[in-house]
Image: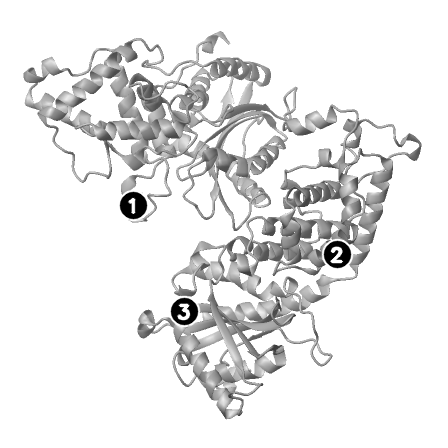
Amino acid sequence: MEKYHFLKRITKSDLYKMLRYKYPLSFQRVSKRNQQHEIVILRETIDLLENYDQLLLMLKNDQEPTLDKLPYLTNEQRVQLNKGINSLRYPRNVLTEKDHLDFFVFRKISQYLGLSHALDLPSRRIIRNLNMHLGKSAMRLCIDSHPLVPSEVGDYELDVFFDFLEKLKPKVLTDSSVDEQFGLGVYEESYEQTFKKTLDEHEQIYVFCFDVTIHRDQPKREDDYLKLYLDYEGKIKAILQKVDGLNTLIHYLVRIEPSQEFGLNLHFVLILKETKYFPENTFILKFKKELAGIFSILADKYTVRNWNDVVRKQFSKKAVGLIKKSDVAAVNESWYWIFSCFFAVEQVFKFNLGFNPHQIINGCLALQSSSLPTSNKNLESLSKDYCTLNDLSEQDTRIFAHRKHLAKPVQQYLSYADLTYFVYPYLSGSDGGHLTLGPLLGRIEVFCETLRAVKPELFIIPNKALLGTFSPEEYSKMHTRLGRMWLSIFKTLLDEPDLFQNLSSAPFRSQNVLSFLSFLQANWSVLQEFQLQPLNDVIMVQLNEKMSILKNELLHHDFIKTKTSLDGNFKKLTKYTRYLLAKDVYALRIQIELNIPNKSLNQTEQSSILTEFLRVGQSAQPLSWLRGYLLRWDQYECVQRQSRQTYADLTLFFEYQSKLQDVNLPEKLKQYLANFIARYNEKKKLSNSANEIHYSMRSCNIFAPKAELRHEVLKIETIDKDLRNSFLKYYLPYFYFLDFFILWVDMENGKKIKRYTKGQEPKAKKISTTEDSQ
């Protein structure tokens, strides 16, 4: 080990160079895309951090310009001074004020100027106060917008700038952390010994670096990184567990850092026991596929990036991949570009979340296997001489994302449930909208389908001769996958009592959910008592018996037969929709309800009127531009009439016409519907009678959970493949498989009604009999 006793550490200039590749987007580039409000760290942010770092070094080394030297500067030196000052000017949005993100050099400057003192001061306030301070002076180092050209620095501004430097200098001279090199922290020093020991033990290792970037699918102009982290904490732990499972893993380092836009980046450095070759890109593809089971396709976005590729191409081919103990150059290159960089970056910026943003975790080949910490609450409960079901309940919901134990058709059904329940946060309160109702319904679906597939056991009951003699720790290991799911759901319902009422009136509920609700209502008081009593064998046995009752109820309803029938028609629907999208179209979704005073009309009664509306309407605008439509019939609980109200959910596709650009299609349709109903009542002699037809129509977003589909009128062009694919991937299955989640209560004339119809696709013209025979 003497050959590399002193490993080469990364310089400041090289680290800033690496950061420019990690955060490549410039303000000019993002402003062209109108994304400047979504980006937190710009390329200019890295430039600014380096420029101020160099300014402090100039002050430390007595190399800064001074007022007394100003008269003796040459023109070229004056130009360089002007250029240097302009490099310190920055628009306010380049130095973000988001909470819990700490910029090392600006925290220092804030302290030097007396704007902050306590190290635990929230970082957002530090940057905000500094931006305000640097924006006030005559020189205005912090400005409101990006300057088109560098400004000339006047004499008075120079006086203000030199005064600024004089305030900083005494503090800089006494600050030992201001140096040419990054400081050697205790974590880096400790890990250096681990790194050397690993090389000694294994002779050669494989260094593999990659990034997992996580952010919300729909940014909400958030400011608080701690809240973001807490929202994703469970999913981050699930990612770490995936990495833990690699069978050639010796250990790995992981750091949580800000991504370019508001989000979290997990930077992994894996130390693997590989002798020749590790298929990096194959790993990336498979790992990305596995993460699909952790993240929500509608609420989250994530990317996986091979950082080894960047290092090889831009910095050093020897720094990553296979590193042999005997190759001193490769060992030093790897330490310089990978490990020294890993620790040093926290001296540029880091999260201030109340814990160390990096971890070193042992893997399968290490002496000590890694494990996720148990929450303090659970540790506290297990330290008592008894435990309750409430103590065993987990807030972590990752278990519901794992569905491989279920049959493929069931997994497909659950994906339709996810699509449907993700709509809840986007509904109005009067329509049943709720922020947390959708995820809870999704978890209930997974629980019910798991209960169908496995034994109805929340707990594995041990040998009866030993019952009643177990410690809290032993009880905590007896619950099954099904038991963990149940405890998580029931605790959520206990902690948020309003959710139970919201479940009872939710507009989208499957037969699973209805059976689950019925079971809860019949057993609520008993289940509550079980949850809070000291756990014993009697409670475990009785809970298992309760689950048998629920399972029997669930097995009475077989959705597979219904799904098989729907799947066949869905292929026809997809084909028809592809025909509709073969031309540029405007798509809009409306819901129409027809009734007479104090009475709801059934589907048969409404269908004949709506069919006539669509048929007759095609002779006049706007329906004369209609290319096709999708129509489904649904019901909701009408409080006024104390009955189920049937309504038509209609998606219309209008072939693109230039004149349509200036037409308010929903309003024009509503006017035409009003005229049609008035004429219909006159023709049928229903006007002013007890049987006069009334209507209501409302326009809806196509599919609110996806931003690109969140429009009442959606233009879909043939060249926009992403939008077409999104429509087919998300809206179409959501629209069609609502049969599962809006249950039809009544049968009409003893027959099951047809809930879905579509427009007619033109038949292909026959060219000739000869061609047909060929």
271 sits left or right of 537 in the view: left
**Mark before the other along the chain sequence, 3 or 2:** 2
User: In front here: 353 or 364?
Assistant: 353
The Cα atoms of the two marked residues, 1 and 3, are separated by 29 Å
199 sits left or right of 383 in the view: left
Q: Are marks 2 and 1 in contact (CB under 8 Å)?
A: no
Q: Is residue 77 above or below residue 610?
A: above
Amino acid carrying mark 1 in the image? Ser
Residue bearing the label numbered 3: 586
388 sits left or right of 704 in the view: right
Secondary structure type for disc 3 = strand
Q: Residue at x 82, y 56 (%)?
A: 552
Secondary structure type for disc 1 = helix
What mark, if any, has residue 31 been given in the picture?
1
Q: Position of residue 331 (x, y in %)?
A: 46, 18
What mark, if any, has residue 518 been given in the picture?
2
Binning the other alpha carbons within 10 Å of mark 3 as few (below 14), some (14 to 19) or many (20 upward) gives many
User: In front here: 712 or 244?
Assistant: 712
Secondary structure type for disc 2 = helix
Q: Quadrant of residue 67?
A: top left
**Mark before the other along the chain sequence, 1 or 3:** 1
Q: Position of residue 401 (x, y in %)?
A: 63, 45
Q: Residue at x 48, y 63 (%)?
A: 702
What colour scheme has been applied to the protein in the rendered image? Answer: one colour
625 sits left or right of 571 in the view: left
Amino acid carrying mark 3 in the image? Tyr
